[in-house]
Image (cartoon, rainbow, N blue to C red):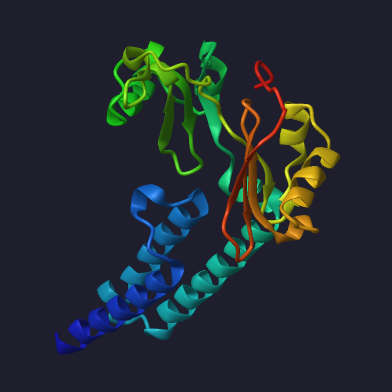
Amino acid sequence: MFTILLRVLIVYLIVLIFLRFMGKRQVGELQPFELVLTLVMADIATLPMTQNSVPLLFSLVPLAFLVVLHFVVSLLSRKSLFVRKLVNGRPVVVMSPKGIEFDALKSLNMTFDDLMQGLRAMNVFRLEDVAYAIVETNGTLSVIQKSEVSPVCNQSLKIDMPKASLPLVLVSAGKIVKKNLELAQIDIKFLQDILTKINIKNFKDVVILTLDSNGSVFVQPKNKKFEIMQTQFDGEGKW
């Protein structure tokens, strides 16, 4: 009995250490490949706990390999947009100013009830209050409410606010997101002009750059404070 308890303690500590190395995400925040790794690790870890005849090494070596695999996949995801999309998928807009995107819901195997439950979890109870609803790559729902019903009710204060806008990521981890450039109908020169204004010479020095349909740009350079600027871009109706 003592031997079994000792094996359980050893495996528990090893798995705990490995999970700490992998990061501090909650289960609901795990990307698909992280969730798969976690489930496989749990299954492997139970073998030496329940079967005294299985050497500890037969469990620890696969666990260590999975941790290394996690770091490799995470590194490739940070370096390559293609790998990131392949492994994690991409956010899907399920509600837009046009209304519910039923094709998008169908592609995610979501029902209307699933959407309503997600909206209620975000304290949104009326569909007409939603400008955009996005299902993130980890399955969570993000909601952008219309300007007139956002907190500090602009409608009741009679403040003329710009329309709610979904920012497009144009540069991510030093890589240009060409699909979003095409969606916004802009070229690389537009991005280069922005970088020139904030004294950045290379796209590789940009952590993230976003643009919304009101022309507002958010730029986060490496090891520097973020910059926000207003451009003459008019993206109303383009996305």
Name the foreground residue: 201 vs 141: 201
Quarter of the image with the C terminus in it: top right
For the view shown, which residue lies furthest in the left direction? 1
Which residue occupies 55% across, 26% down?
165
Note whether 196 is above or below 122 in the view shown: below
Name the foreground residue: 90 vs 185: 185
Note whether 9 is above or below 187 in the view shown: below
Side of 75 where 110 appears, left or right: left
Name the foreground residue: 200 vs 136: 200
Which residue occupies 56% across, 69% down?
71
In x, y percent, where is residue 35?
43, 54
Q: Quadrant of residue 76?
A: bottom right
Quarter of the image with the N terminus in it: bottom left
Side of 202 where 8 appears, left or right: left
Q: Quadrant of residue 51?
A: bottom left
Which residue occupies 38% across, 13% down?
158
In x, y percent, where is residue 193?
80, 44
Name the foreground residue: 86 vs 173: 173
Which residue occupies 38% across, 63% down?
24
Q: Quadrant of residue 213?
A: top right
Side of 123 where 206 appears, left or right: right
User: Number of callouts in the render?
Assistant: 0
In x, y percent, where is residue 18?
41, 74
In x, y percent, where is residue 222?
64, 63
Note whether 86 is above or below 70 in the view shown: above
